[in-house]
Each structure stands twice: as structure tokens, then as C-alpha cells.
Image (tube, rainbow, N blue to C red):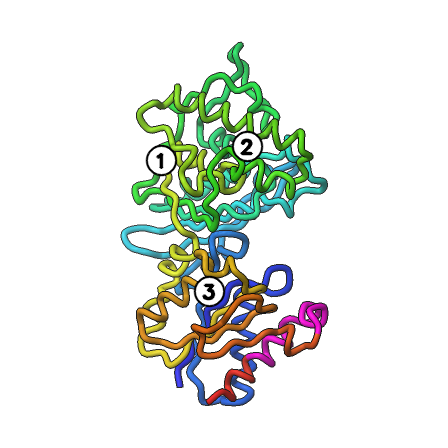
Amino acid sequence: MRVVIAPDSFKGTASAEDAAAALAEGWRSVDSSVDIEIRAMADGGEGTIDALAAAPGAVRRTVDVTGPDGRPVTAAWVVLDEPPGPTAVIELAQSSGITLMQELAALEAHTLGLGQVIQAALGEGAHRLLVAVGGSASTDGGTGALRALGARFEDVEGAPLPLGARGLEAVASVAVDGLVPLPAGGVTVLTDVTNPLTGPSGAAVVYGPQKGADPDQVVRMDAALEQLAIAVSRAAPDHAPDPAAPGAGAAGGTAYGLALWGAALAHGASAVADAIRLSDALEGADLVITGEGRFDGQSEQGKVVSEVGSRAAAAGVPVALVAGAIDAPTDGFAAAVSLTDLAGLAESAMADTLAWLRAAGAQLAHRP
């Protein structure tokens, strides 16, 4: 029997790679003859480079950059050996992520470090960039990253703006003539959200509070992003990004900012699946196991489980689901295992997730 294991991370408790390994160990404890192929997945947020680091020929790199609160951080990225040239996979969370903040500072946090990682990857000869933008600390519209790439943002007197959303409140002009050229293979921004830049479902209103913004700051940040879009439309009338485009508000508007550079926005899980050659792995498989921390109504909206499921359906491969908790119907799956049900309590499942993942793998091995 041949089984492909392609889960997302179980956020906060197990990486995708560790989750897949535990499921495989559990299955092999029952059936040592099974042929298992692991394809750890991600949706464009945290964990993307960990998933792609397991791809054949992948090499991990690091560089010291400026973190979202100004302190130095060491950020990792991954190089994939692909024709016609190397692809660099960069994860915003590594350089500008919310987990890097000592204290949340919604107005001051920035993405300068992300741009510095991009510069490092370009300096090493990257032919193409994949930029995963989940887990951001800031709502700066990607202006910090763009500064590192050569853009300028100034107030009415022509003075450079401070980094972060606070500086954007005074943005009057944008200069993009100094931006470094895109790599020959282009830049793709991987996102798992569809929020526009501004408005009731925009970056500041939806995600600002979790970055530490109070109601007044949310209003200020939304207005600042709107002002940025106006300034960008004046600076680049022929190729200004659409602030209403789905995904433009990802990572505090970083997706919008990188689109000004010329990046394309893409569905994160689909791009990761392409990069790890998931469809190739599914050819001839008898079963694919996927999963995530919580399977609910959002899981079918472009997340890892739905991406794996759609590719498995195209290949005619049945799908088994393993999740920390299951809060939605599972009619389309060949089998479904809840770690919470196995452990008896959600707290127990989260306290030793890998052990319960091994138990789930063993249970799936026993299925008819």
C-alpha cells in the first residue's frame, strides 16, 4: 500500500513536517510494509519554508536583518533548485513576524526586515521569489520592505517618513524609480486570505486588533492605508495595484506593497503544492492523509485540506482527515480522526499532539 501524508501544521503544537512524521510512525507501528511518502504542506503563512525545506534539493539560508520592532533578528529562507534558475522562498514571519515582537506596537511595527531578506536572496542570484506573508506584526502596507528595495515615502515637506503605520499617516508622495528590478522569474506573494487593503474587511479593521491596535488606532491605520493608496495612484498611475483586489490586505497590506513592485498575488496552498510536486506524489497512491489543527467552516476556503482534497480528487485518490478538532461535516473523506476525540479533552490533545498524531496514524492503518 502506498500512502501520501500531506498535512498543514497543527499551529502552536506541531509543525507540518513533525505532524507528518508522527502520522507515518503511527501507521508503521501497525503496518511496517506500507510505502509512505511525506509532503508537508503550508498555506502561505508561518511554516511555509519549513514545508518547502523538505523538498528535494532544498537548501536553507539565513541572514541577519532588522526585526519588526527595530531589534536585529536572524531570518531564514529556502532555496529550491529549479530550472531555469533557483527559486528563493521567503517567509515574512521570519523577519517581520508578530512572534518577534517583545511587546505589540501596532503603529510602529514594520516590514523593513522582509525587504532586507529579499535583497539578500536577490544578491545570491535568485531567479524567482515566492514570498509567504502570513503572521505579520505590522500594518505598514509593505512600505518597510519597499524601502529596503529602493522606494521612497515622504511627507508634504519631502522628509522621509518614520517606519510603520504611524509614518503612513503623513504620506504625501511615493517614489518608485529607485526600486530594484524584479528577478527574471518574477515574484509571487503567497497568501491565504482575501481581504482588500482598506475598509470594513481590510487589513487594519480585521487584523489590527490582534496586532495590538485599540479601536482608535484601527481607524488611524485604515485611514493611513487609504492615504498610501492615493499617493501610490498618483506616483504610478499606469501600474498602481488595486487596493480592492482580493488579498491586497494580506499581512497588513504587505501584499499590496509588493504588488506595487510588480509581484503577483497567488493562493498560498496551491503554490506550495506546486513547489513540493504534490500532484506527482499522488500519482498511484492508495490514500492521502491531510490535516490541520482545527477543521471547520474555513477549511474548505482555500486552506491546505481543501487544496490536498481537490488534487486528490483529480488523481482519484481517497482522502483521510486528521485534525486536532473537527467542527464541520466530513462526508467527503474516506476517514476522519479527531485528536480531541482520541485524547478525550482538547487540552490533553494539545499537551502531547505528536503522541496523539501517532495514535491517529495507527487508527488509520487499521481501517478497512
Which amino acid, by three-letter code, is at mark 1?
Answer: Gly
Name the disc covering residue 305, or none: 3
Q: For the residue labelled by badge 1, is the local secondary structure a helix, a strand or a loop?
A: loop
**Given contact means CB atoms under 8 Å apart, are the residues at marks 3 and 1 in contact?**
no
Name the disc covering residue 17, or none: none
Provide residue 140's location: percent of width, then percent of height.
55, 32
Q: Which residue is at the far left?
A: 84
Using the numbered discs, state the Cα–Cα distance from disc 2 to disc 1 in whole angstroms: 18 Å
The quadrant in which residue 33 appears is bottom left
Of marks 2 and 3, the one in the foreground:
3
The part of the chain drawn in magenta is 345-360
Judging depth in this view, the residue of 88 and 2 nearest the camera is 2
Q: Residue at x 72, y 68 (%)?
A: 347
Q: Residues within 10 Å of mark 3 (few under 14, many from 20)?
A: many
Name which of mark 3 and mark 1 comes first in the sequence: 1
Provide residue 243's location: percent of width, then percent of height.
43, 33
Of marks 3 and 1, the one in the foreground:
3
Provide residue 77's location: percent of width, then percent of height.
49, 50
Q: Which residue is at the far top?
A: 157
Q: Residues within 10 Å of mark 1 (few under 14, many from 20)?
A: some
Judging depth in this view, the residue of 299 and 51 nearest the camera is 299
Q: Which residue is mark 1?
A: 262
Which amino acid, by three-letter code, is at mark 3?
Answer: Val
Q: Residue at x 40, y 32 (%)?
A: 260
- The image shows residue 236, relative to residue 125, as above or below, that is above
